[in-house]
Each structure stands twice: as structure tokens, then as C-alpha cells.
Amino acid sequence: MSALRTLGRCWPLPFLLCLAACGAGSVCKQIARSDKTVASWAATAAMVGQRWAAGDVPTSYARNTLAKGARQMRSEAAALARSAGGDPLVETTSTRYVQLAAVLTRMEALAGTGNKAEVAQLAAALPTLERLDHRCSARGQAQAS
């Protein structure tokens, strides 16, 4: 009987911890971590694309780096979707990552054909971390209210 009373008093703690871990804050933290990875690869791709277009980077290096960046972005999209699938913010974010990966894949193909002007144009248009805004801060403010 005392074991049941102890269990009865303790059950809310794991339940509340689970709710806290599964809340919007957790989703926003996952997106923030993924954003850093994706933004890092976008910055790398932008630098490599611009340097390749200027003739400072070998074609094989540019193509390999762009292909790896595209794979990593797709991997981040898949991992994010697995961890918090069904959340509209996660779905939108994952879609944006896949779209960015497609840009890197296009840059890699263009580098293979020697199209420096279009690679430079795409490189200049890649987003920075500040431009990967997902309104997580608005979600956190709404929860705090």
C-alpha cells in the first residue's frame, strides 16, 4: 500500500518532464541546432562557389564540397523530420533544407559544366543563419504568456 502511495505522489514528475522535453521549446532547440549546421554548409558553399568562379579553387574540390553540403542538408532535414515529424514548423524547415540542398546540387552540376557566372550568382543568393528565421522566438513568447 505504501508503495502505491509513493508511486501516486511521484508519477507527475516523469509525466511533466516528458511534457517539457516534448514541447515547442524542444522543437525550437532542434531547429536551432539544425539551422547552425545548414547555415554553416550554406556559408561554405557560398565561399567555395565564389572562390571557384574566381578561379581560386579546383573544380574537383568545389564539386566534392558542394555535393557533401547537399548530402548534409538532406540529412539534417531527414533527422529533424524524424525527431519531430508532424509539427508544421518542422515540416516547413525540413522543406527549406531540401530546397537549399537542391541549390547546392545545381551548383555542383554547373561547376561540372564550367558555368562560373551562374555558380557565382547562386552562391551569392545562399542564406545566412540570420535569414533562416522560423518564428521559434514567437512560439516561446506565446508559451511564456
Image (cartoon, grey):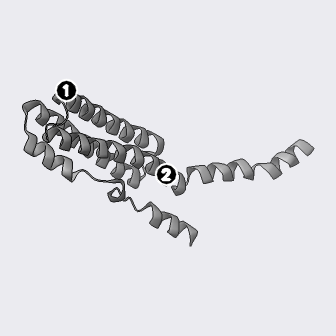
Name the element at disc 2: helix
* Residue 60 - label: 1
User: Do tag 1 and tag 2 residues touch (Cβ < 8 Å)?
Assistant: no
* Residue 27 - label: 2
Say whether disc 1 or disc 2 marks the residue closer to the N-terminus.
2
Q: Is residue 91 left or right of residue 138?
A: left
Name the element at disc 1: helix
Q: Could you tell me residue 4's position as x and y percent?
A: 86, 44
Q: Could you tell me residue 34's position as x and y percent?
A: 42, 45
Write the residue at 63% across / 48% down: 18
Q: Is residue 142 above or below residue 42?
A: below
Q: Is residue 9 left or right of residue 97?
A: right
Q: Where on the picture, by quarter, is residue 105?
A: top left
How far apart marks 1 and 2 lie (CA) works out to 37 Å
Q: Is residue 24 above or below residue 1?
A: below
Q: Residue furthest right?
A: 2
Q: Could you tell me residue 20's position as x and y percent?
A: 61, 54
Q: Could you tell me residue 61's position as x and y percent?
A: 23, 29
The residue type indicated by label 2 comes to Val
Which image quarter is the C terminus in? bottom right
Q: How many marks?
A: 2
Q: Is residue 12 left or right of residue 5?
A: left
Write the residue at 54% across / 66% down: 143
The residue type indicated by label 1 comes to Ser
Q: Is residue 1 visible?
A: no
Q: Is residue 78 above or below residue 12?
A: above
Mark 1 neighbour class, 10 Å CA radius: few under 14, some 14 to 19, many 20 or more: few
Which image quarter is the N terminus in? top right
Q: Residue 134 versus residue 49: which sits nearer the camera?
A: 49
Q: Residue 49 versus residue 122: which sits nearer the camera?
A: 49
Mark 2 neighbour class, 10 Å CA radius: few under 14, some 14 to 19, many 20 or more: many
* Residue 93 - label: none
